[in-house]
Structures are given as structure tokens and as C-alpha cells.
Amino acid sequence: MKFLLSSSAAALAITFSGAALAQAPEWTGGYIGAQAGYGFKAENDDETVVFDTDLNGSFGDAVRTTTGANAFSPGFCEGRALGATPAADCQTRDRGFEFGARAGYDMQLGSFVVGVVGEVSRTNVHDAISAFSTTPASYTMERELNALAAVRLRGGFALGRTLAYATGGYAKGQVDRRFRTSNTANSFAATTNDDWVDGWQLGAGLEHKITNDVSLGLEYLLTELEDDGYTVRAGGPVPATNPFVLTNPAGTNFQRTEDDLKIHAVRVTAAYRF
């Protein structure tokens, strides 16, 4: 009888111990890892270039010739101009690969998991807009996202070894800006060409633990960066009849209409948990 009681007690102890282990949080703890994927710029077919001909800080002026005609009547196109006229078309390089490293910490509360993750990435997504003048000539304002750093919160639900989550937070990107033109008559000066700009990220993902320590995942992120203030000044020395100096002898400033750089990215992730 004593043997039976002892055996039953031992069996119950093992059962409860196993249940406690099964209920123990699987996602609580820190991790380090990496991510790699593909990013592409959000389409923006309505973007143009705007001008400030009297240099009063207000953009939206028309650049006029001496006859009053619009010097930029040929229009605009998304991408880098391949020639001096719209007929030459524009080339878009609005997508590219990215890779980087991450570290974070998660805490499981029942089936709910909350955490924070920080990451850095290298990428090479381009974003350009071109304008065409009646000269004829082309003017391209281009920016390239070279690097990203982000700190995000994330929260989701654990279904055993699989975690479904949403994530969002602060992002900072390194943007390299370039100006290209086929106009050889005017001089052109640009503001800072390379800068770190602020923004945010929002996304969702799935992560699955293939072992107790290793997890693999799939993640989507939308990144929006505020890249404002990049200005190009077209000036002389040129005759006073040149459209860029016709209103103000000091020249004409121009900017692109879209300040926000929006990038979609799909990445695979891997993490070692401890």
C-alpha cells in the first residue's frame, strides 16, 4: 500500500512538474540575430519639381522665358533622366537588397508577448525625379537610402512555438542626395548632400522557434523618413535673359515636392535566444 501511495505521489509530482514546464514562458528573454530582405520605394507618380524664382522661400513659381512661356512645359518623370528630353525616358532604380543585425528582449504574459528590438541595416534603394526644360535640358534630383537604424516595440500572441506580432517605432536613415543635369550654361549649388533623417517604422511578422534557442521569421516593414530641405540653386554667370535669373539675378531655387521617403521591405529573420 505504501508503495502504491508513493508511486502515485511520484506520478502526480512528475505530472504537475511537466505541466508547469509546459506553461513556462517560451518567449521571455533576450536575443541577438540578423535580417535580410528586399526593399522597394512606394510609388508616387504625382511628384514634380517646384521652383522659387524670386528667392522668397515660397516654392510654386513658374520659371518663365523672356516671352513668358513656361520653361518647364515638357514636364517631369519619375526616375533618372536618360536624356535631355522626355522622349529619352527615365530609369528607375527604386528597389534593392538589405541586410543587418538586431538585438532585443521579449516578455511573455500568458499568451501575450511584448518586447523591444533594435536593429541596423544596410540598403540601397534609390528615389529620383527628373524635370525637363525647353532648352532642351534635364534636371534630376536623386536620393539613395544607404543605411537604417531603428528601435521598435513589438507585441503579439504566442501559439506554442510560433509568435505572430505587430511592431512599430522610431527610425533613422542615412540618405545620400545627388543632383544631375545636362544644362551646361548655368551653375548649380546644392545644400547638404549626405544626411541622417528621422522617421518611423510600422509592420508585422511571424516568428517560429525551430529549437528552444533558435528562431526563424518573416517580417514586413513600412519605413517613412522625412527628407525635407534639400534645395538646388541655379545661377550664373549667364545672360540676364536666362530663365533662372530673369526674376532674381541671384538665381532660382528648386526642390522636389515629396519630402517623405517611403520604403516597403520584406525580410527573413533569424535569432539566437538566451
Image: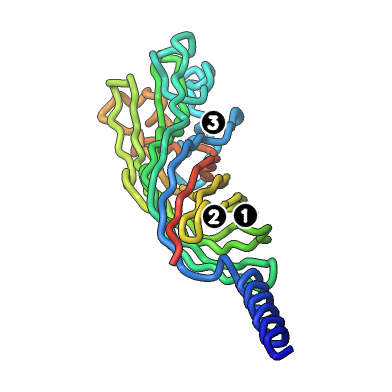
Mark closer to the chain start, 2 or 3: 3
Q: On the picture, is 158 further left or further right than 29?
A: right
The N terminus - image quarter: bottom right
Quarter residue 17 falls in:
bottom right
**Spot occupied by residue 133 in the image (x, y as percentages of width and height):** 45, 19
The Cα–Cα distance between marks 2 and 3, rounded to whole angstroms, is: 47 Å
Q: Give the colouring mode of the picture.
A: rainbow
> In the image, what residue type sits under mark 2?
Lys
Q: Residue at x 59, y 28 (%)?
A: 45
Mark closer to the chain start, 3 or 1: 3
Give the labeled residue for mark 3.
48
Q: On the picture, is 24 further left or further right than 256?
A: right
**Spot occupied by residue 179 in the image (x, y as percentages of width and height):** 35, 32
The C terminus - image quarter: bottom left
Q: Which mark is residue 45?
A: none
The Cα–Cα distance between marks 1 and 2, rounded to whole angstroms, is: 6 Å
Residue at the extreme bottom of the image, as rendered: 2
Give the labeled residue for mark 2.
209
**Spot occupied by residue 107 in the image (x, y as percentages of width and height):** 57, 71
> In the image, what residue type sits under mark 1?
Thr
Pick the front one: 171 or 247 = 171
Q: On the picture, is 202 further left or further right than 12?
A: left
The Cα–Cα distance between marks 3 and 1, rounded to whole angstroms, is: 45 Å
Secondary element at tag 3: loop
Q: Is 228 located above or below residue 188 in the figure?
A: below
